Amino acid sequence: MIHNVPEKWDLEADLVAVGSGGGGLTAAITAFDHGISALVLEGSDQVGGVTAYSMGEVWIPGNHLAQQAGITDSKESGYRYVKELSMGYGEELAILNQAVHGPVALKYFEDTIGLKMCVIRDLPDYYFPYNQDGLPEGRYLEALPFPAESLGEWQSKTRVSPHVPYSLTHEDIFSGGGMANMAGWDYNVMAERLTKDLRCAGPGLAAYFVKGVLDRDIPIHVNTSVEELIGDGERIIGVRAMQDGKAIFIKANRGVVIAVSSYERNASYAKTLGHQLKVESMVMPSIDGAHLRLAGQFGARVARVPDVTLLGFHVPGEEQENGVPLWRGALPFLGMPHTIVVNKAGKRFANEGFYRSIYYATDAIDGNTQTHPNFPCWAIFDHQAREKYPFGSLMPMQEMPEGLGVTADSLAELADRIGVDPQQLELTVSTFNGYCESGVDAEFHRGTHPWGALMCGDQSQKPNGNLGPLSKGPFYAVELHRLAGGGICAAGVLADHHCRAMGWNDKPIEGLYVAGNSMARLDNGAFMQSGITNARGLTHGYLAGRHAAGKPSELLQQEIERLGL
């Protein structure tokens, strides 16, 4: 192991958490609660990480809140569900470890930091009812509105999200018509919560953990970019960071937890590790693969699973920090009535109402021609869609800004403008319109996943909330771009069940832990479901904090013995 100990240390704690999202904050809290000191290092000027950018869903099978609501579930069922859908890309014990500890970590933070969550009613698992262990509700949780003013001076330093309506709960959104029907939401509730700074969704979830750190007087250092791990030849003992233009050395007596999300802002990493070409990102610029650079110098093993590729678009003029274009995910809009997605041949190629279908299909390779037949692709919709539904930040009937897409009076003219065969596009739309009359998509089964029907459908549209004909001009086309997974990456640092980073010799790198999206996703493999990422972060932080404090959890071993594995 590398020996690069500095002559002196500038700061010291037993556990140093690198990153201030869910994984880093929960590791610091758990370590402190188990008797050791902690501090948090954040490279940007705001805390909350990718957790605060998310919808805030936390997916935990067998949780106590579902039980209290009278919903029958178990961690065993959740384990079977993920294992089957992982398609063999995951590892059995990693999946079991998350199933065992997810409910425990949730209850722990409820008891210790006052985390207040509730079941998101009527929100089904992705693959319910196709998988026998899928449930119609109970596993999705969200935080109750958090009073951000209780953060004091950290209120303005704790992230909010440009992507989600963080002043509304899922119940508010669903009762108002769903994710893609912004026009039906209760804007009086939104205004009241914004005025009081009551945060929901990801910003609310992250704020609970920030408050937990502040209540314990755990130091948080922002604008502190970790550049290098420090080793003494046997273990990791600290980090070198840049703060205010100068190097500082922080000693970690028990361990360093790296929880900096993914690498999607690093185009080279996205291409070579995730195999994502020309990919854009919805997350903040600091998510650039620091965990791989830091841990890689000490021999950390990298593992990968299939990508989580998304599709999205950029509304001209919308920017996030540092003038970086704000890319918006297309998920809530592609499955709405009067909307389809076509490839360069003018054909539909997947179920637009279930993102797992269309996003896998987007990256398909035709070996006969050595091409991506489904990319580039376009969202095609008619005037009915613009009359009734939003598109990104555009409200119904709001004029599309120049540069977002193209408009034409006929489908043939639209096809000509985007370089698609006019006859094929007209045939595709005609066929789709027939499905809308019958309510059955015979090609791609659009509208058959209850989750997709709820998240990107119009519940008032009968007989199928995801189907509606394209029959009223003018017609519109918006080119869709590949987006990375919003922090959910294909590759990460391999870790054991205590979240210790593993070397290529299959032995733990002593003193080094990883959490959240910095850890390889062998606990879900090819499977992904919204809410899993936030659940992983808080679970990993809990496990790493306990182990660093010398009080590791023994629950996995007990479960292995009980199941006879």
Image (tube, helix red, strand yellow):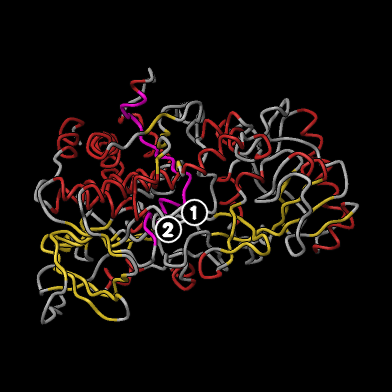
Kindly indicate the quadrant of the structure image that contains residue 150. Answer: top left
In the image, 551 versus 53, the foreground residue is: 53
Residue 490 tag number: 2
Q: Is residue 443 above or below residue 499?
A: above
C-beta proximity under 8 Å, tags 1 and 2: yes
From which residue to which does the magenta span run?
Answer: 46-66
Q: Residue at x 47, y 41 (%)?
A: 196
Dot 2 amino acid type: Ala
For label 1, the crowd category at 10 Å Cα-Cα, with few meaning under 14, some 14 to 19 and many 20 or more, is many
Q: Is residue 163 visible?
A: yes
The residue lying at 18 percent from left, 33 percent from top is: 564
Q: Is residue 553 above or below residue 270?
A: above
Res 316 → quadrant? bottom right
Q: Is residue 106 left or right of residue 266?
A: left
Q: Position of residue 388 (x, y in %)?
A: 76, 39
Badge 2: few (under 14), some or many (20 or more) residues near its Cα, within 10 Å?
many
Q: Is residue 530 visible?
A: no
> Mark 1 = which residue?
308
- Residues at marks 1 and 2, CA–CA distance in whole angstroms: 7 Å
